[in-house]
Image (tube, rainbow, N blue to C red):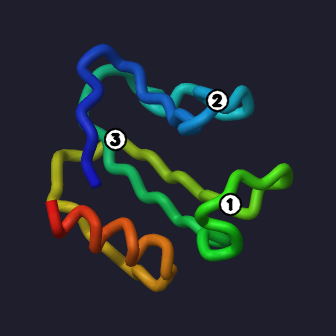
Amino acid sequence: MSLESEEGFLLVHNMMDGPPRELDELAYVGPGTYRVRVHACGRDIAPHSRADTPNEHYLISVWPAPETPPTVHKQTDRYGHEVRARETKR
């Protein structure tokens, strides 16, 4: 996916707690367009509950590049399938 950072800031936020402290600023060359790739695993372990120990793990890659249509490499988790099905019904 492509994201435009007009101000030169690009942060990842946790839905419950805000940005994780261990993640640096992702728009590392300032304002502009960036490509973002997210790899997730563990999404089907406990998708509908808040766990004390995180089950999901993410690898986020960001690099400056011109805007390009999204590319989906693989969608196999059941939870993601549920979310995409809800979005389609809207």
Q: Determine whether 42 is above or below 75 in the image.
A: above
Residue in the picture at 68% in, 62% down:
56
Real-space Cα separation, disc 3 to disc 2, in angstroms:
27 Å
- Given residues 46 and 6, the one toward you in this image is 46
Quarter of the image with the N terminus is bottom left
Q: For the residues marked 2 and 1, what is the alpha-carbon distance in whole angstroms?
A: 16 Å
Foreground mark, 3 or 1, reads 1
Q: Quadrant of residue 46?
A: bottom right
Disc sitting over residue 33 in the figure = none
Three-letter amino acid code of the residue under disc 2: Asp
Q: How many marks?
A: 3
Q: Which residue is mark 1?
A: 57
Secondary structure beneath dot 3 equals: strand
**Going 77% across and 54% down the picture, which residue do you hit?**
51
The answer to whether residue 67 is left or right of residue 38 is left
The residue carrying mark 2 is 17
The residue under the point 74% across, 63% down is 55
Q: Secondary structure at mark 2?
A: loop
Instruction: Answer with mark 3 or mark 1, whichever residue precedes in sequence.
Output: 1
Where residue 18 appears, x then y in whole percent?
A: 59, 27
Which of marks 2 and 3 precedes in the sequence? 2
Judging by the rendered image, the residue that carries numbered circle 3 is 64
